[in-house]
Image: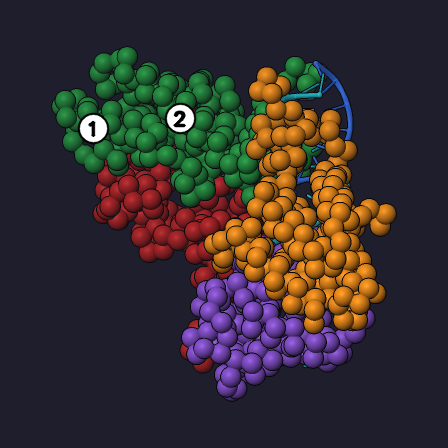
Chain colours: A red, B green, C orange, D purple, E blue, F cyan
Amino acid sequence: MRDGTKTKEKIERIALRLFVEKGIAEATIRDISSAAGIAEGTMYRHYASKEELARSLFSKNFASFSREFDRFQKELSGTRKKIEAMVRHFCAFFDKDPILFSYLFLHARHTQASFVEPKDPHALNILVKVIADGMAGGEIPERNPHLVASMVAGVVLQVATARVYGEINESLVELSDVLVVTAWKVVKG
Amino acid sequence: MRDGTKTKEKIERIALRLFVEKGIAEATIRDISSAAGIAEGTMYRHYASKEELARSLFSKNFASFSREFDRFQKELSGTRKKIEAMVRHFCAFFDKDPILFSYLFLHARHTQASFVEPKDPHALNILVKVIADGMAGGEIPERNPHLVASMVAGVVLQVATARVYGEINESLVELSDVLVVTAWKVVKG
Amino acid sequence: MRDGTKTKEKIERIALRLFVEKGIAEATIRDISSAAGIAEGTMYRHYASKEELARSLFSKNFASFSREFDRFQKELSGTRKKIEAMVRHFCAFFDKDPILFSYLFLHARHTQASFVEPKDPHALNILVKVIADGMAGGEIPERNPHLVASMVAGVVLQVATARVYGEINESLVELSDVLVVTAWKVVKG
Amino acid sequence: MRDGTKTKEKIERIALRLFVEKGIAEATIRDISSAAGIAEGTMYRHYASKEELARSLFSKNFASFSREFDRFQKELSGTRKKIEAMVRHFCAFFDKDPILFSYLFLHARHTQASFVEPKDPHALNILVKVIADGMAGGEIPERNPHLVASMVAGVVLQVATARVYGEINESLVELSDVLVVTAWKVVKG
DNA sequence: CATGAATGAGGATTCATTCAT
DNA sequence: AATGAATGAATCCTCATTCAT
């Protein structure tokens, strides 16, 4: 590697993009390796299989996102503040890397359901927990926390989707005030 | 056909299920035909290709849903009533046929984006229009109608997703009161 | 059949055309039956298989042509007259039915070699015999009669081919004087 | 490659033989690859499709033959000499590689018509030109040069065909004196 | 680490043929 | 005789993966 980019990083960056653009099944090893400027066989120096590449791309990033997500809310107190921080974190993360965001959150869940290790921290679960805690603490009305978390998540994710498909032109950070307010309304019931 | 079920219907029912369960790329013609109890070649009497099957399954049902969806709101006046009717229609539709609902609304948009004919009525666009009309009529505050529509749609779709994955146990119809109230809050801003 | 055309004739006419246009392997039963306006299964009322159709089309017409060809020369005396009659017969036959001519004489011989029954009269063999007789009778110089017959046949067949592909615009009958003279020169050595 | 034969060459040699023996449509990828001792998939590293293989086999060899053919006649002056050189070249080429000759010149023209690039030099056209030039120069009588070229070509091609099918036992080179004399008679009219 | 030709199982599709109506 | 839906073997082709260099 004379260009200073490590092969593995190149593979991951390209694979991520192609998985999102075409889908995991439709993006071939040849697509990825040729876009990455490496030989097909070279992929297998770094990943045992295409599935492992897809899975690793997911787990690694998903876990790291979830950890950060978790830390964020832990440092704050008050459900309102936690929710706000989470929404803003989502928005910032989307704007920073929409492709990774799409890979982690917008793709058919059935594909990636199998990628989530139960032991890993899971962003959605953290949201559920924050909401459940808020209910337990009397800050927000008691309801099924999964239901409430889904509604909140839906607000943000669907806006992200609309942004990906060009139906909305603002960045998510620009929209984050609206999203925070809306998320809180949803949580407050 | 001795069992009174027409081959084409059998193909469609099975294909829909397998496309949702495994994904379009992963569901093979052999999977579909063997589950349908027919020969592989028989598929091609009814559909020119697997892609045409997937596309037709989408367009036909999507268009018919959207038309119904449209009619529903047209018969009512007042943004609140229209939104309520739409949310309830979504919920009822989900409960009646969760597999079809998943195929139409929960799958990777990039796959099916190409399936939507621009001329067809489109459920999301109808929602956008209802919201835009409500804003024009002063019933709800002025904002980007695409943004508001996305947030509303997200609430319902993410709950549907959670239901599909067993994170929520109630039927969508049981949840529709909550969803209507939440949707309206989101719209009112 | 209300249009007075018998199904079998319709099949044969269409099959002949498609076999010549696309090749036997490339012309499908569906092509033929749909062009003939009948059902696919109907073919099998008249022919046991596609191969039998191709073979029968060949043998029947080839044998009938060869018989006529044979009679023609038998009725004449003198090699020159026989050759002339044969060439003119070829030309007239081509003009009358270029598609049938192409099927019988211009298609890959390997395909149709297997169609010729050794016992059947064979146009080329008749030509060989006429030439051999002419040599035996001292009318034309002694050479390998197969060689001479091939050269003569080549003159006519290649002109027919050129005509089929539009490289020549005159009908074969219009060209038959030239062809007769040339054929005779070839035979005379 | 341990046997020193390159895969691509092996494919081409075998494919050529099978295309001639069985026809392009009838020779399957499996036939070719198994005769070549390679895997089916290996074909596709070298050719995008069976059709591309057939086409490339044709174009490459046809163009190279035609160029040589052209050069040959250009170096000579006098129609008689040119014709003689061309006929002898055909004969030598046939004897050197009867399979390639058959593939290029004896197969159903409709199959390979589409393989000829209009810009490529074309053996038949060269013959037409030589004849047309001879007419213009007063060396041979004026007639439709396409007609004369067809007759000359027919003489040689039909003898080649007879040789392929074992109706003639001499090699074409052995027959070339006769063919040259005959061709010239045809041209002289 | 990197290469890329070779592999071969598996997938979509075609099509001659059958058969119940 | 005619139909045309159904069949399934056979075909072309793809692509994840292996391995000799």
Q: Residue at x 57, y 46 (%)?
A: C95
Q: Give the numbered dot on residue B132.
A: 1
Graded by Cα atoms within 10 Å as few (under 14), some (14 to 19) or many (20 or more), the crowding at tag 2 reads some
Give the structural element (helix, strand or loop) at label 1: helix
Q: Is residue C40 above or below residue C61?
A: above
**Mark 2 highlights which residue?**
B63
Q: Is residue B96 left or right of residue E13?
A: left
Q: How many marks?
A: 2
Q: Is residue D3 visible?
A: yes
The answer for which chain carries disc 1 is B
Q: Position of residue D103 (x, y in %)?
A: 65, 64
Q: Residue at x 26, y 42 (%)?
A: A168
The answer for which chain carries disc 2 is B
Q: Is residue A31 above or below residue C69?
A: below
Q: Is residue B149 above or below residue C173?
A: above
The amino acid type of the residue labelled 2 equals Ala
Q: Is residue B36 visible?
A: no
